[in-house]
Amino acid sequence: MKIDSRAFWVWLQRALGAGSGKPRRILSVFPGPREFYEAGRREWTMLGIFTQKELFAMESFSPEEAQETVRRSEELGHRVVTQESAEYPQCLRNIHNPPCALYVRGSLPDFDALPSVAVVGTRGATFSGRKIAFGLSCQLAGAGAVVVSGGARGIDTAAHKGALQAGGKTVCVLGCGLDFPYLMENAGLRDSIALCGAVISEYPLGTPGSKRAFPIRNRIISGLCDGTLVVEAAAKSGSLITADLALEQGRDVFAVPCGLDNPVSRGVNNLIKTGAVPVSSGYEILEQYRFRYPGKIRFERERDLSGLLRGAPAPAGQRKPPAPSRQAEPKEERAPCGAEFSADARAVCAQIGPEPVPFSVLGQKTGLDAARLLSALTELELGEKIESLGGRRYRLPQ
């Protein structure tokens, strides 16, 4: 079996584990992971930095097996981007413990040429917090910044949707393999992200999510970005780990101030007390990078945040009841989608009812190809006209 150089990076990452800082030490002594592998156990031991468990892993997992990992990834349409690749972001290579390899679905934006902001926060976000994350991300992406988040419920989901709504670029960093069925209600969202940016992971195919994996993943979210924005976080929120990592990496930290009566305000307000920059607009963040990225930030396209949020529907249970009519009149059937939606979105919405409809069935009924169908579904989700379920199924909101 012919083994290409990427397999040795995959071998090293698999043997030492995600988040290890030891590859940096190895590369200060050896030209690359291939040369390190060929040096053998005696020279590995002489470095004096490996545990017996790590030495065993380096011997028991072979480059041939790593090459098979590369092959399987490519069969699924994923790419393996290693530190020696020109596509690998220099900003990520500069952190203390960069991943040896990234598994990429979609296209990585040019992080070294574009402003990028991580938007993170609690999974249990309030309706107001989700609106704010959506609006700020829409501003950031619309002005030319890459929005990075972790694909979780709450603030992460709102951030990705805001970037997509603006027609911008967004990247989702997972803490599991790209094929693992993580949060299947967001499967359609990840499909849309892959069309307009990338879904990435340092974990190979088949790796399940775990409590340990996601905090390790957070260093990639902060490492890819110029700054990290926290929108709603409790005192012990995982998003505060991302903020701490950003500071360790020499990056900026921003926070949206929260009211004292907000149950997820303490973490954000503590960040501001300790030096995070309070912001109320995405453009306040991008102003920090105006001269770092000349000509890359489109301030002429500024969009008022209140305008972005004004049309958002109220959360369930808080919608105003209809005003009583003077006489009983038959209800007029409400059109599911108005003229503000694209023709594709209206066609798709017409095929969705209260019962879940699979993605493949929608494609057959509308005649849309996968890319157009995903775009229409994302538009409808952002407009809260439909909801996504597991297994790439969709229905009208209940």
Image (cartoon, helix red, strand yellow):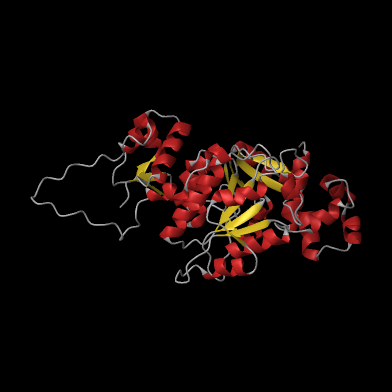
Q: Write down the quadrant of residue 278 in the picture.
A: bottom right
* Front in this rendered view, residue 337 or 49: 337
Horizontal side of 271 relative to 383 (left or right) equals: right
Q: Write down the quadrant of residue 75 in the picture.
A: top right
Identity of the residue drawn at 46% across and 61% down: 125
Horizontal side of 141 relative to 2 (left or right) equals: left
The total number of labels drawn is 0
Q: Write down the quadrant of residue 90 in the picture.
A: top right
Q: Is residue 206 visible?
A: no
Horizontal side of 281 relative to 324 (left or right) equals: right
Q: Is residue 115 visible?
A: yes
The picture places residue 136, in percent across and down from the top left corner, at: 51, 50
Q: Residue furthest top?
A: 367
The picture places residue 152, in percent across and down from the top left corner, at: 52, 55
Identity of the residue drawn at 85% across and 51% down: 27
Horizontal side of 62 relative to 235 (left or right) equals: right
The picture places residue 258, in percent across and down from the top left corner, at: 50, 65
* Front in this rendered view, residue 137 or 24: 137
The picture places residue 178, in percent across and down from the top left corner, at: 58, 47
Q: In which quadrant is the N terminus drawn?
A: top right
Q: Residue furthest front?
A: 300
* Front in this rendered view, residue 113 or 70: 113
